[in-house]
Every structure is written in C-alpha cells, then in structure tokens.
Image (cartoon, helix red, strand yellow):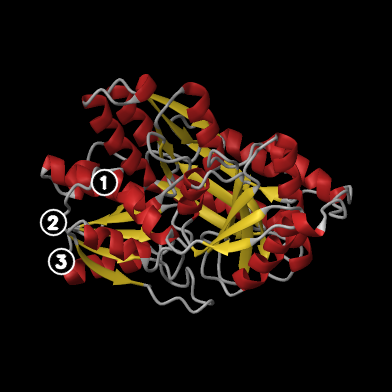
Amino acid sequence: MKLFGTDGIRGKANSFPITPELALLVGKAVAKNCEAAGHGSRRAVLGKDTRLSGYMLENAISAGLLSMGMDVLEVGPMPTPAVAHLTRSLCADCGIMITASHNPAEDNGIKIFDNSGFKLSDDETAAIEKSIADETLSSSHIANAQIGKAKRIDDARGRYIEFAKSTIKNRSLSGLRIVLDCANGAAYSMAPAIFRELGAEVIAVATTPDGQNINLGCGALHPENLSRLVLEHRADAGVALDGDADRVIFCDADGEVVDGDRIIGMVALDYRKRRRLAGDAVVVTTMSNLGLHRAMKEAGIGVIVTDVGDHRVIEAMRERGCNLGGEQSGHVIFMDHVTTGDGIITALHVLKLMKERDASLRECADFMTAFPQQLVNLPVREKIPLEELDEIRTLCREIEKLGSARAIVRYSGTENKMRILVEAPERDTVELWTERLRQAALRRLG
C-alpha cells in the first residue's frame, strides 16, 4: 500500500485514502511512530485548512491519536507552515495538517511534521504505511486513565502572527500598497492582519471561505486575477497565497507575474551581498528556469538541483547547510527562520527587500532573462511507468539534441495527471515540442 505522495497523503474526500476510517488509522500510526522514536511530550498539534471535509478528518485523526494516549492540541484553520512552527513552539511530538494545498475543495490530504517541524522522512512515512498495512494498530494496551485529551489552543493564531513579523524584525511596511489574495484558504484572516499590523495598505480578496471555494478561481494558481487587481488598485505589488499558504506568487506594479525562481534569485543576490548566503548556493528543483541558473552562475552563486517536491529541496538544504531554496511554483524556504515553505514569511521578506532597496518589485526581480517555458498538466487514466513510454522518451532525447533546450515529463505526486515541461531559447520551439509531447501522451494515456 502506497499512501504518501510527494507531499503527504492526498485524494478525493470520502474516497480512499481520504476517508475517516483511514484517517483514524493514520492518527494511530503517527502516535505509534512517535512512541517508537522515543519522543517525550506525547502531544500532537492538529490544524486544517478551510475545506468542508476538514471537520470529518480532524475528528477522525484526533480520535486515533487520543486512543493511543496522545494529547491533541487543536489549532483550527491554520497555514501549514504555522502548524510546523507551532509544533516546535509547543514542544509537541509531531504536527499534523489536514489540507490538499492548491487542489480543489473536493480533495483533501494529510501532511505530517516531526517534533522539529520538518516533514517526515521517507523512512518515517514508510513505517507509518507499514503499521497501517500490517493492521498492528491496536490501542487495547492504553488503559482508560491513559487515553489522551484534546485541547483547543486559543492563542495559536497570535503566536504565529508574532513569529512571522519577528522574522523581519517587525520592519515597517508603511507606504506599500498590496493586493493580497488569500485563496479562501487557511490564511484568510491571519495574512491580512500581519501585513496591516506592519503598516502596509492591504486590499484583501478571497477572504470568505465557505468550505467549497478554497482555490476556486483565486490564489496562487490564478495570478491573472492578482494582475488585474494590482493594476486596478495601482498597488505596489500583489501577493497570492495558495489554500494552505505554504506557497506564494507575486505580481509587480505592472501586473507581471513574479514566480518562485525570481523570488529565490533576488533574495540570494541580497544575501550574497550581505554575506548571509550559507554555502554560497541555493537549492532548486529540476523545474527551475535555466535563466535562473545562468544568473546565479554569473553572480558566483552555486545552484543545487533536486527532484520536484519542497521536501526534497529541504532535505538537500539540510545536507548541504544551505539557508535558501525553493520551487518555481512559489514554495520558498528561509531556513534561518522556518522548516518548510511559508508564503506569508516569503512575502514579508520580499516586501522588506523592496523597502530596504527603495526599489520596485520589478527592479528587484529584473536580474535574469527567463527562457520561454510551457507547462501542460494532462489528466491520465493510469500512471504507466515512464520507462515504458518509448515515444515520449524518444521525443525528450530529440529535444535535448537541439542544445539549450529540454523537456521534463513526470507524473503528479498528488493528482492523476502527467506534467510536461518544455524549455528552449525560442517560444516557437517550446510550443512545437510541447504539442508533440502532448499528442504522444494522449495516444498512450489519454
């Protein structure tokens, strides 16, 4: 049984594996894993985003934890990075976040953090899967007096707000007007409060979650809305979070999208100038634009490349001692402050950089020339192993022979989709080969 994908467990709510029955077992397995690791607090932080199915899963996971003798610290709707922070702040054994991140409302998922606030390793997720598959999750050894207690942490929101502001030393953002798209997600009330408390003028949108509208035509997956609103309100910048606020996409004052590659690059250059860039390198994934690689090389900054997934980036950062990394999609990790991607804290650091340089976002982001890229997300019936897709593999090899061009084909770790990325110096080349790969995929998988 394979439950964990590239970012926790994910699927359609009320269908395997996102059922209350499986969620109960996950809670029990996590508790068992914490016990085996020898952690002493016997407490779990439990948060969720704004999906309707979060109520169902929250109760099921909590019951599993309680039955195994763990206390549950419930924090309610909360960004994923806030759950990671609170796990450390409250000295808990683990943190569990109920979210499907940028996926639509009918999906949900489970992300798990260890007692240091980092996502579980592959070995740890394998141990949890094994416990569930082996049906070795009896709680009969827990006597009545040992059953855990659940407690709502009323000041969790305030704890994270103060922590987030402290990462930029409560630097005033007065004078900046921003459009803030909260995706009707976990940061719907918290994010506007943070930026307003620091003095920014905030036009907040997508802040009325109803359980069904998370990520619906809003948030980081729909920067076109942000672009329009930035121009309409003559804002200095636009900030779009996703459903659980672990990623962020920007728009500059001209409505142009500023993605994770440009965020990482502009911060890296600033860190290098201040001698704060650990290891003189950044960590990115295979999806990052070749333009970023060139710009970093010219600046004497190393680029370490990992497979897709922010947890892969974090693993490499920890191994190499780096303090900055992330993904083009907007997961950015400031390891000096956080243990996972954090959209709010990333936005704070970018706005702080604009203030310190007395520069627009466009000026800060204008350090690289991006290669044309096209990304296609193609629904598939089944995920046939890539090594068996001969036509697609042949096309990828032909693209690489063009020089300064590449194609990356992979399956989504959270959805039944194939992702096709083509990158080349000329837009026409990108569009031609993207269509060839798309047609090849449809013939075999569509």
Q: Residue under label 3, please give it.
A: 234
Mark number for residue 213?
A: none
Where residue 160 appears, as percent x and y from the top left, is 39, 53
Q: At 29% from the left edge and 26% from the top edge, which residue is drawn?
A: 276
Q: Is residue 274 left or right of residue 61?
A: left
Where residue 109 appears, as percent x and y from the top left, is 63, 59
Mark number for residue 174?
A: 2
Element under disc 1? helix
Q: Mark 2 or mark 3: name the one nearer the start of the chain.
A: 2
Disc 3 vs disc 1: which is toward the camera?
A: 1
Mark 2 Cα shell of 10 Å, populated few (<14), some (14-19), many (≥20): some
Name the foreground residue: 44 vs 250.
Answer: 44
Q: At 33% from the left edge and 69% from the top edge, which residue is drawn?
A: 225
Q: Is residue 390 visible?
A: no
Q: Which amino acid does label 2 sit on?
A: Ser
The image quadrant where one finds the C terminus is bottom right
Q: At 63% from the left edge and 40% from the top edge, which residue is drawn?
A: 120
Q: Residue under label 1, please give it.
A: 350
User: Looking at the image, do the residues carrying marks 2 and 1 touch, with CB atoms under 8 Å apart?
Assistant: no
The quadrant holding residue 241 is bottom left
Name the foreground residue: 380 vs 394.
Answer: 380
Disc 2 vs disc 1: which is toward the camera?
A: 2
